[in-house]
Structure formats: structure tokens, C-alpha cells
């Protein structure tokens, strides 16, 4: 197994902007562990009296319904310090958020503060929507000390920061512990391996957990593939929650879909559904949604990110747990995404928006988001708060943290024309997972669409 140091980037991804804020860190900070970094020349986060006198109403726009409770608690804490700034929280589903953002940016009506995201960052930068934060950081002597340097790097261009780091996410296996207990099958653990040739021990486990109406699994004589009552695994058309990790673990390129190793990984995912019969067909997954299908209790395992734990905590009526991703031919790999908070460059109340964004990067907000189990905070000091919250709910979320130590860590492609490229990917992966094309045909079709955009 190829074991990486923490936060090593895969060669298969585009390079992140690695330059650091001149006012936000020592020159060698990018080479140190995130917990060791001091990314500011000053440690002061205290607001002056004049700052607290700022008045106004601002609109804060996010896509994360599952974070609303934690965000509202944080807004209440913010208003104890800034009673004269009213924050109007608005949300939209992920698939509507970005189209609404584009419409509002074009019309000059974008929210004063908005949630930024790794692979949409370049597209937003092209529009000039995000206010440069570095001049404000330097003016106020604001500190980014303790924040994960990777998130800072994601939202930095030409030594300028455009989004305040908020949180990290990565991916693991989430499994139905009660279902494994019911069929007396060992839980997924760190020994699990997969490969695109015979599936490895990962496929064997999925086969044992795919059960027909007579209680037989795939490995037993008389198994009825036409009457499956529970599946061993769930494949979803989700880049970060599912297929990007399999591509990376096979040595493929998440930005080159006709790469032979990428094709192999994607063909394996199709085979899980149609060759091995251990995953439900895409029509059912799309109808219910992957998270809801898992919560129904009829799926043993799926891969997803820690952002979904809040949803599962409310919807699962059974004991569920988390485990490391299975080790692939190139070891374990996990996509790591960082969420940032940006000030709209044309905001009519920019100072109030900036005060709120500073709060979103502060110890106060970070502690709330960790302690409510909402997200893995960007500040590493509050990771244990998140783990402890879920432990109190009976869920061991530590494998998400452990992935940083045992896996190759890579970041999403940060490329222009992401909306168009993502549309081509989603369309053709849908066709693949509906068994209408094979992985090579999928890769060729996506490559052709990419070529039109170059």
C-alpha cells in the first residue's frame, strides 16, 4: 500500500494555488502539518468598539440544509456581539444553488455573504463575485492562525484570499451495523481491499451482504437476483461521494475520463450493479436519493462524506457506523474539499458582511459547528468536538479524521468552465450507470465535450 503523509496531493489532480498570504503565514507553512501552522502575523481576533457599532442587514446564502441548525446557533452567538447586524439566512438545494448564484451575480443581486466551494471557485472568480479579503485581513489585523492551510490555499489566487475557511470534508464507508449483525457478517474494517479485476475483499463483503427474499446471499447456491431485498453496496452518480475516490485509488485521473485507469475504475462501478448484482439500479437510487435509500435500511454500505452525518442522524432508525474507504491498487485515496465563505464584491453593506465573515472564521463559530456535529471545522483545535458529538450519538466518526493519516489526499479539479464540464460528466456517468454505454464510451464522450471547451 502506498501510504502518504498528511495532505499529500495526488499527481492526478490539477495543482492548487500554493502561494500563501503574505500577511497570513510563515514562508514554510505549506510544508508543515496543518495543526502546526500559524498563518497570520498577528494573533488578534478582537473586534474594536467601532466595529461592533456597525449596523445593517445582510443576506447569507448557502446550499447546506443539513447545516442550518448549527448555522442558526452561530448566528445567535454572533448577534450577542453584533446586535445591530441582522443576518437573513437563505438556502437552496445543491443542484439549484449554483444556477441561482449565476443568475443573481449576473443581475447584481447576489447575497452579501455566500458559501464558496472548491470546484466552483474558478467559475466564480471569472465573474468577480468574491471580494478580496486580504486587504481587509491586513487592515483589521485579523488572524487565520490554526486554520487548515489547504483550505486557505484553495481560495487563494495571486497571494490574495477570497473566502474565509470554514470546514473540511472527506469520504468514508458508512454502513448499517444492524444489517451486518442480522446476517452475522463481519463489519468493514481497515483490511478491506478492492481492485477492478476481481473486486477483492470489498466485493466479497458486498456479495455476502446482498440478500434475496429467501435469505440467501450472492455467494450461495439458489440466490435469486430478481428478488433482492437488501444490497451490499450503493453506487451513486456523485463525484466526491463516490466515483472520484475509486478513480484515484486505481491510479486514474479525475479530470481525464478517457484515461485507461479512470475507465477501469468506472467500469468496476458499473459491474457492481449489472455484473455482480450487489448494488441497486440507478433508477431506484435517483428516485429515492442515495442517503434516503441507505436510511431505508435496505443497503449495507455506501461511500459518502462527513457532511451527510447530520442527515443520517435524523433519518436512520438503526445503528449505523463509519469505516475507512477500502484500499485500492494505489492505496487509499480521499477527496478533501474545503468550504469557504465569501463577501459579495458588490454588496451594499460590505463592512457588515465582512464582520460576519470574520465571525465565521472565528473560534466561536468553529467551536459551535464542531460541537453540534455539523461539520469538521477548518480549525484543527475543534476536530475533537465534532468526533465527541457523534460519539455521544453512538456513532464513531473518527474514521473520517483517520483518513487524513492513512490515505492519499487529493483535491477536486479547479478548472474553468466547470458548469459545462460537470454537465457532460453527469450526463455520461448517468448513461454508464444505467447500462446504456460502457466506461470507455463514457470516457470518450466526456473527452469530446471537454475538447469543445478548450
Image (spheres, rainbow, N blue to C red):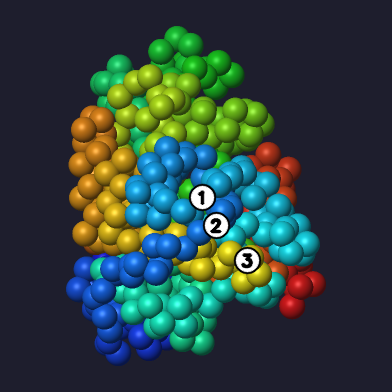
- Residue 394 in the image, given as x and y percentages of width and height: 23, 30
Residue 86 — which label? 1
Quadrant in which the C terminus appears:
bottom right
Which image quarter: residue 29?
Answer: bottom left
Disc 1 crowd rating (10 Å Cα; few below 14, some 14-19, many 20+) is some
- Residue 60 in the image, given as x and y percentages of width and height: 55, 53
Foreground disc of the pair 3, 1: 1
Kindly report the distance in space between the C-alpha atoms of the residues bearing marks 3 and 2.
Answer: 12 Å
Which image quarter: residue 19?
Answer: bottom left
Is the residue 259 above or below the residue 111 in the image?
below
Marks 2 & 1, CB-CB < 8 Å contact = yes
- Residue 278 in the image, given as x and y percentages of width and height: 49, 32
Q: List the single residue furthest toward the top.
A: 214
Kindly report the distance in space between the C-alpha atoms of the residues bearing marks 2 and 1.
Answer: 6 Å
Is the residue 438 above or below the residue 131 in the image?
above
Q: Nearer the viewer, residue 439 or 128?
A: 128
Q: Is residue 400 left or right of residue 137?
A: left
Is the residue 133 above or below the residue 204 in the image?
below
Q: Nearer the viewer, residue 123 or 162?
A: 162
Residue that mark 2 sits on? 56
Q: Residue at x 47, y 40 (%)?
A: 68
Q: Secondary structure at mark 2?
A: strand
Quadrant in which the N terminus appears:
bottom left
Residue that mark 3 sits on? 347
Amino acid at each position: 500500500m502506498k501510504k502518504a503523509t498528511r495532505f499529500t496531493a495526488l499527481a492526478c489532480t490539477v495543482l492548487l494555488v500554493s502561494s500563501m498570504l503574505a500577511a497570513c503565514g510563515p514562508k514554510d507553512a505549506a510544508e508543515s502539518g496543518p495543526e502546526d501552522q500559524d498563518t497570520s502575523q498577528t494573533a488578534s481576533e478582537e473586534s474594536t468598539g467601532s466595529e461592533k457599532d456597525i449596523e445593517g442587514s445582510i443576506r447569507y446564502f448557502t446550499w447546506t440544509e443539513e447545516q442550518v441548525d448549527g448555522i442558526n446557533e452561530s448566528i445567535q452567538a454572533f448577534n450577542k456581539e453584533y446586535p445591530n447586524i441582522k443576518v437573513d439566512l437563505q438556502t437552496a438545494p445543491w443542484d439549484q444553488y449554483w444556477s441561482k448564484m449565476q443568475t443573481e451575480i449576473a443581475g447584481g443581486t447576489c447575497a452579501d455573504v455566500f458559501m464558496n466551494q472548491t470546484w466552483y471557485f474558478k467559475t466564480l472568480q471569472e465573474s468577480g463575485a468574491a471580494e478580496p479579503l486580504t486587504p481587509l485581513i491586513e487592515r483589521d489585523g485579523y488572524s487565520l492562525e490554526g486554520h487548515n492551510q489547504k483550505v486557505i490555499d484553495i481560495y487563494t489566487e495571486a497571494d490574495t484570499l477570497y473566502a474565509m475557511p470554514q470546514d473540511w470534508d472527506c469520504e468514508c464507508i458508512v454502513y448499517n451495523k444492524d444489517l451486518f449483525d442480522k446476517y452475522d457478517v463481519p463489519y468493514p474494517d481497515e483490511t478491506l481491499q478492492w481492485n477492478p479485476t476481481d473486486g477483492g475483499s470489498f466485493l466479497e463483503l458486498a456479495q455476502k451482504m446482498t440478500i434475496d427474499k429467501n435469505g440467501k446471499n450472492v455467494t450461495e447456491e439458489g440466490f435469486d437476483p430478481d428478488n433482492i431485498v437488501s444490497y451490499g453496496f450503493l453506487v451513486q452518480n456523485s463525484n466526491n461521494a463516490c466515483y472520484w475516490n475509486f478513480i484515484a485509488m486505481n491510479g486514474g485521473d479525475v479530470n481525464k475520463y478517457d484515461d485507461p485507469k479512470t475507465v477501469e475504475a468506472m467500469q468496476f462501478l458499473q459491474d457492481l450493479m449489472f455484473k455482480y448484482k450487489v448494488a441497486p439500479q440507478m433508477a431506484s437510487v435517483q428516485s429515492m436519493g442515495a442517503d434516503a435509500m441507505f436510511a431505508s435500511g435496505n443497503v449495507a454500505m455506501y461511500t459518502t462524506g462527513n457532511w451527510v452525518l447530520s442527515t443520517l442522524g435524523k433519518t436512520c432508525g438503526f445503528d449505523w457506523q463509519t469505516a475507512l474507504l477500502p484500499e485500492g491498487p494505489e492505496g487509499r485515496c480521499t477527496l478533501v474539499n474545503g468550504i469557504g465563505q465569501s463577501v459579495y464584491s458588490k454588496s451594499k453593506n460590505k463592512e457588515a458582511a465582512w464582520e460576519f465573515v470574520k465571525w465565521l472564521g472565528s473560534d466561536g463559530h468553529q467551536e459551535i459547528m464542531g460541537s453540534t456535529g455539523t461539520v469538521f471545522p477548518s480549525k484543527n483545535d475543534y476536530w475533537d468536538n465534532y468526533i465527541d458529538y457523534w460519539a455521544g450519538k453512538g456513532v464513531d466518526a473518527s474514521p473520517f479524521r483517520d483518513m487524513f493519516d492513512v490515505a492519499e489526499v487529493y483535491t477536486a479539479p479547479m478548472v474553468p468552465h466547470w458548469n459545462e464540464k460537470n454537465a457532460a460528466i453527469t450526463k455520461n456517468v448517468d448513461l454508464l450507470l444505467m447500462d446504456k454505454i460502457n466506461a470507455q464510451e463514457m470516457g470518450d464522450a466526456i473527452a469530446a465535450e471537454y475538447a469543445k471547451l478548450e
